[in-house]
Amino acid sequence: MLDAFATHDPNRLAGLMLWGGYGREGVVADIRSLGGLMQRPLLGIGQADDDAADATGNGDAEGPPRSADPNGERQLVIRTAANDGSGAPHETRFDIVRRSGCLWLRGRG
């Protein structure tokens, strides 16, 4: 994941994802979206249950941690700088799926 952001290469991130059930056009569109994600500065990567920590990772956020997906799947949360000038981090979430003894990412779209 870090290498994908360091090289701004959406194909490196796409290589960590499950693509079963996607048509060619869907895959191309999603990889283009990943390309846009790769252009933003990476602020942090964590699991959804780590969301109680703020984007700086100091863990001082108030309130109970939010749980992962209600279906019981774990989620990976990628925080990037927003490009709207608000200063608030942008979050992109991926489900973490176990297949064939490996962990994969699946887009939430």
Image (cartoon, grey):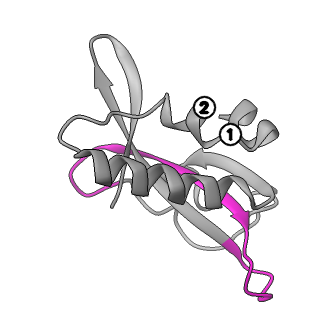
Q: Residue at x 22, y 34 (%)?
A: 20
**For residue 82, which quarter of the picture?**
bottom right
Q: In the image, which residues are magenta?
A: 69-89
**For residue 96, which quarter of the picture?**
top left
Residue 32, image x, y percentages: 52, 56
Q: Is residue 48 above or below residue 20?
A: below
* 85 is within the stretch colored magenta: yes
The kind of secondary structure element at disc 2 is: helix
Q: Looking at the image, do the residues carrying marks 1 and 2 touch, with CB atoms under 8 Å apart?
A: yes
Q: Which residue is mark 1?
A: 9
Residue 34, image x, y percentages: 55, 53
Residue 51, image x, y percentages: 58, 59
Q: CA distance from mark 1 to mark 2?
A: 6 Å
| Residue 12 tag number | 2
Horizontal side, residue 24 vs residue 84: left or right: left
Q: Is residue 83 above or below residue 102?
A: below
Horizontal side, residue 82 vs residue 16: left or right: right
Q: Residue at x 43, y 49 (%)?
A: 94
